[in-house]
Amino acid sequence: MAYPTTRLRRLRQTPVLRNLVRETVLTRNDLIMPLFVCPGTNVENPINSMPGNSQLSVDLLVNKCKELYDRGIQAVLLFGIPEHKDEHGLVACEHNGIVQQAVRALKQAVPDLYLIADICNCEYTTHGHCGTIVNGDVHNDLTLETLAKQSVSLAQEGVDMVAPSDMMDGRVGAIRKALDQHGFYNTPIMAYSAKYASAFYGPFREAAESAPKFGDRKTYQMDPANTNEALREVALDIEEGADIVMVKPALSYLDVIQRVKTNFNMPVAAYNVSGEFAMVKAAAAKGWIDEKRIVHEILTSIKRAGSDLIITYHAQEIVQDL
Ligand code: PBG
């Protein structure tokens, strides 16, 4: 029935009515907060381009996580800034690696906080690439070994989930196999499946001190122009054993999130990345936007597109309002 019988404005008349018919509701259960851990004690290095975020030493990270958990954050994604880097990123696989230390301390201090570890080499290699370099490019199959080692090492420390972000072919399968061989068959893999070679990672590379020293990541991360290829990436990751598939970044890739959600019956994660966060913060600092409303709208749109989990630096600030 058309107008005048049908009036869509009828259901918009009051806040209660709007609440009753709302299709997408953001909850604190959707959120994952990324955190950066660095060496030392009592160290807090604020990240310039990401206001409210810092590199924290393990002791301060523990305090921060207690506070976040009390505020309603139930899951965090950990990134490490190691004391030393090496050519192959092997420092990421050591019992005394920086994330390993953090996981041990956090599991003691905040046992119910769900710990996800980013699995990648770029924070740990001297050259800043996401794997082992051979003839000027990242060698896919050699890198798989380090990624599997890093994953097993973190699982041994008690990490709850691993999230490979390197974009090597076959890494989900290699990690799954290694985890299973070590008895960690219940440790889920959240794969950064459709991860694009994006300028939106700029602030993160300052935060994680992981910018490549030469070249770029275009031989392993995806071309922002492609979505059919994203579906192939996701399909392969699922075949190899991914439990959750991710699209990253989020905002410029809502179409990809939606295609992934409708094509596969899988939990989908989206990463609302550092550059997306920084743009909001910069505009808000100038008084040009209403930050709270914008953040709510952005995160709701990511969920509406089809994302079940949202990794976002806004989590710590928005969680109280949910
Ligand atoms: C590591 C990694 C990156 C991000 C998450 N894991 C950076 C990159 O690929 O260069 C970006 C996160 C963000 O921008 O917030 N490979």
Image: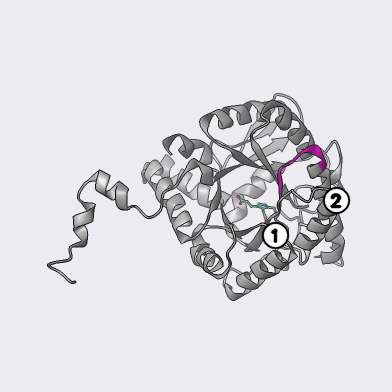
Give the colour scheme shown.
one colour
Q: Is 158 part of what is drawn in magenta? A: yes
User: Of the residues shown, which amino acid type is indicated by label 2?
Assistant: Lys
Q: Where is residue 142 in the image (x, y as percent from the top left)?
A: 87, 62
User: Residue 82, relative to residue 265: is it above or below?
Assistant: above
Residue located at (76% from left, 53% from top): 128
Highlighted range, magenta: 156-162
Q: Is mark 2 within 8 Å of ligand 1?
A: no
Residue located at (53% from left, 63% from top): 257
User: Residue 292, relative to residue 266: is it above or below?
Assistant: above
User: Of the residues shown, which amino acid type is indicated by label 1?
Assistant: Ala
Residue marked by disc 2: 149
As drawn, the residue found furthest toward the bottom would be: 228
Residue 115: quarter of image: top right
Query: Relative to residue 168, is residue 296 drawn left or right?
Result: left
Q: Circle 2 — which element?
A: helix
Q: Position of residue 280 (x, y in %)?
A: 46, 47
Residue marked by disc 1: 242
Query: Relative to residue 272, is residue 107 drawn left or right?
Result: right
Query: Relative to residue 277, is residue 95 drawn left or right?
Result: right
Looking at this view, is 107 or 56 the one in front? 107
State the count of labels: 2
Residue located at (48% from left, 37% from top): 319
User: Residue 229, relative to residue 288: is it above or below?
Assistant: below
Badge 2: few (under 14), some or many (20 or more) residues near its Cα, within 10 Å?
A: many
Query: Relative to residue 200, is residue 132 drawn left or right?
Result: right
User: Residue 216, relative to residue 91: is it above or below?
Assistant: below
Residue located at (40% from left, 53% from top): 24
Instruction: Tell me the CA gap for discs 2 and 1.
Output: 17 Å
Q: Is residue 131 visible?
A: no
Q: Where is residue 122 in the image (x, y as percent from the top left)?
A: 75, 52
Q: In which quarter of the image is the C terminus?
A: top left
